[in-house]
Structure formats: C-alpha cells, structure tokens
Amino acid sequence: MTAPKLSLTTTTADEATVDAVVIGTVQSDSDPGGVTLAPGSERVDAAFGGNLAEILRTVGATGKQDEVVKIPSMGKIKAGLVVAAGLGKAGDGGPAAEQVRRASGVAARALAGTRRAVTTLSTVDLQAAVEGTLLGAYRFTEYRSEKGDAPVERVDVESPAEGTAKEHRTALKTATAIAEAVRTARDFINTPPNDLYPASFADRAAALGRDAGLEVEVLDEKALRKGGYGGVLGVGMGSTRPPRLVRLSYQGPKARKKVALVGKGITFDTGGISIKPAATMDEMTSDMSGAAAVVAIMVLASKLKYPLSLTATVPMAENMPSGSAYRPGDVLTMYGGKTVEVLNTDAEGRLILADAIVRACEDGPDYLIDIATLTGAQMVALGRRTPGIMGTDEFRDRTAEIARSTGEGGWPMPLPDELRGDLDSKLADIANVTGHRWGGMLAAGIFLREFVAENVQWAHIDIAGPAFNPAAPWGYTAKGGTGVPVRTVAALLSDIADNG
C-alpha cells in the first residue's frame, strides 16, 4: 500500500491547516496516572489555555509507551483532531530516539483513513519521527479484496528549532530512504511463497538492483552446478522450483573499504526430510528475511551513496521433502571444496550461507556481514525481539552496540571452542549440526566461521525471532515481516564509511 508523503514545514501545529495534529505525552515518574506533554506541543497546549495535559488525563491518557488518545480540538486549533501518542517515561535528557520512533509509529497507524496530519514529534527527533511514521503506516494488503482504510496520505513534519534547513532536509531524505528500505524488505517477506520462490525472488531482486544502478548477476541451477555450489544445490534438490544465487555490486564514490553482505534466502522451509511440525510452519514464509534485508540494503546504499564498495551474495532455495530431496546422511561438497555431512535437513540455512560466504570472501572484503533467520535456538536464548550477533570479537561488539542504538536490538554471543568438536563428522570435514540441543545458535555460528576467510572482520546476525512478528502490531512494527535488521546494517555501513 502507498506510503504517506512526508514534507518539512515551518508552520506550527496550532496554525497548520490539516485534519489532525500529533503530539507526544510523557508518563510521570512519580505520579501514577500523571501525564505531561512532550517538547514541541507548547503552542497546541497554549491554544487549550495550558490545560491540554489535564484534558488528556481526564479522558484516560497516561503517557505510557504505545498509548494513543484522540480528542476533538473543539475549534481551539485549525485541525479538528489532536492525537496524543505516549512516549513512556523520559530520561534526564528527554525522550530517546526509539521512544519517538515508537510513538510516531502508533500515531501513524491511528491516523489510517486521514488525509493530512502534522507531527510535533519531529521537534524532539526528526529522523526517528520520520522513520516511525513511515514504518507505522505500513500495511501489506496486496492479497486482500477489502483493503480497509488507507494509510494517512500526507504528514507535515514540523522542523526542529535546532539545526539548519539544509540539515533538516538531509535528515528527512536519509530517514525516508532507510524507512523505504525497511518497507521493501517487509514486502518481500510478506509475499506468500507460491508467488515468491527462488526464480521469482531472483527476478525481483535483479530488477530492483538494475533500477538502482547496481551490477547484477544471477546464477541459475545450471550455473550453480557448474560453479560447484553444493550447499545451495543440495538444499534446493527437493523442490520443483530450482535454486538461484544473486550477486549485486555497488561501487561508491571514493570507496575506502570493501564490505560483503550475505543473506539467507530460503523462500519456504518445510524442514525437508527432517520435516517441521505443522504448527506455525506458515511462518516459514519469512525464512528469506535475511536475503530480503540484504537486497533492500543494497538499493539503499545506492540511494545514499555510501563511500564503500559493497557486494551482496544472496543464495535462494526452497527446502522441500520429495523423492529428489537431500537426506540425513548425505555428504555435500560445498563451494570451495569443503565437505559437510548432513545430519539434519532442517539445518539448511547454514548450508546455503556457507557457499555464499566462501564466494563473498573471494572478493577480499574488509568486512563480512551475514544475516539469517538461522536457528530456533536464537528465540530460546534471546526471545523474539533481540537478534543474536556472533563473529570476530571486535566487529561483533561494534555491530551489537550499533544495533541497540537503532532500537532494533542485538546482543553479542560467544563462539565457544568446545562446541567445535561436537560438529566433527565421521565422514566429512564437518557436520551441519552437533547432534544435541545445547548452544544451537552458537554451534550454527561456529559452523559458519569455518567458511569465513582469515583476516576478514565478520558479523553474523541471527534474526530467527526478530524478522517476523506473528502477533498484534506494536510501536512502528506491523504484523508479519519486520524488516529487521535493515536499519542496523544501514547504521553500521554509515559507521564504517565514517570510521573505517
């Protein structure tokens, strides 16, 4: 569904000729049920005689996070409606960026069916307000005959007092591009697997890449066989829809660092012969979330012109059980020659990633970032909202810190040496699982480490839980595909560009 159009305005919210005004409310630290107004709402409050907080409290507002309260303006301002979005409790420095992002998201969702609104949350944090508005307004209605209320058509973003007009325009452009990349990833994830399968996914990724001016290469099953991509071919054997591998390349201006991106693109995962239980198997349409994120990030890099050399290697396959499917006990020869004994065909993501990682390392990158819905063990350890981040120590910690700063979350996890012995195979160089349930997320990371070239700074981001929201929307996160960790990687690439 079409995204809202956002534009900067210097017209204050009380004077804006719009249908609705968005303000922020803050939860009191000391007074249960107490609510105060966030910065930026002073002129609207003045129009209500300084009583707006009391009016909102009377109708039940508390300022808690993700709360939305609507009141009619009664002619006090030009807009007919005031939408108060809760920020939660503010710290000493005022509301944090993630609080603004979440409040903007719930406000945007509450404005569905509205023609035009203005937000004052942008005066607290412009980039966070823009991202939250565009992501909160996201709805995927491609397959619905009844579309429901359309997202708010237009949101005027009130300019902050600090900074120049040029800085504000740059922030708006950057935030819009990042949010559009997240929305692109969400669209991919939410497309059902009968329409998004390896060949169609590759075609769509290639089209986006070409439109963005990227160099594009697509390997079909014949090229994969000729190239020796045993992991991708092995996983894709059981499907009537053969696998693909997409390569997207971007050369930024005055690029000083080379970064390789790899994303897991299992367009549907039954588990193969080691078949999954039926319950929630429908969520496995999201098993290509890593690939979706990587494709979206490559397009974003072209828009924002990062001064980096970027290459994405994206393996795509469908993991199905059939007479031609690979079996527990098979030995696969991976790209580069290493052999893997398959003990569980539901540990397929690491097999296609291994091929892609070896190929990506042939380009001699300084950094390698792989993104995957890799293990259920990630959710057991960290829940549905916190990615597990593994890799080389320094880059792992840097990635995790940046992930938390974006609000997407991330926690650094170890790769214990003692687990490597549990991946020893009786037949091959390595087995694809340990044969026990302990430290499953870590063992998957250790497996991938075997395929990363020396002297490459590497981060592996396991998004098995965070990639998909099966429950009700919250903050700026819709039901379905989330687009995590697009914003994390965007911030990480920006940091590499600035600091090496």
Image (spheres, rainbow, N blue to C red):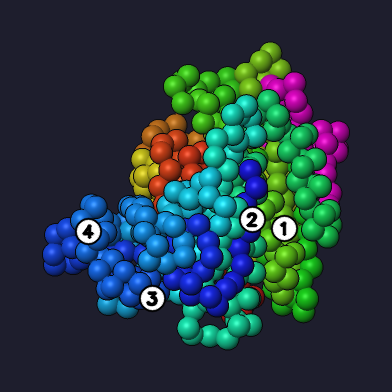
Q: Earlier in the sequence, mark 3 or mark 4?
A: 3
Given residues 368 and 189, the one toward you in this image is: 189
Q: Position of residue 260 (x, y in %)?
A: 68, 60
Tell me which amino acid carries mark 3. Answer: Arg
* Residue behind mark 1: 299
Say what secondary structure mark 3 lies in: helix
Question: Which residue is located at x 73 percent, y 38 percent?
Answer: 201
Region of the chain picked out in magenta, as a range:
216-244
Image quadrant containing the C terminus: bottom right
Q: Which residue is mark 4?
A: 57
Q: CA distance from mark 4 to mark 2?
A: 38 Å
Q: Is 141 situated left or right of 48 in this image? A: right
Q: Are marks 3 and 1 in contact (CB under 8 Å)?
A: no
For the point 37% across and 55% down, the residue is: 72
Task: Compare marks 4 and 1 and give the one earlier in the sequence.
Answer: 4
Q: Residue at x 46, y 61 (%)?
A: 79
Q: Which mark is residue 394?
A: none
Residue nearer the viewer, 471 or 119:
119
User: Which element is circle 2 on?
Assistant: helix
Q: Which residue is mark 2?
A: 181
Q: CA distance from mark 3 to mark 1?
A: 40 Å
Q: Secondary structure at mark 4?
A: helix
Q: CA distance from mark 3 to mark 2?
A: 34 Å
Q: Position of residue 96 (x, y in %)?
A: 37, 69
Instruction: Inspect this view and state whether residue 103 appears.
Output: no
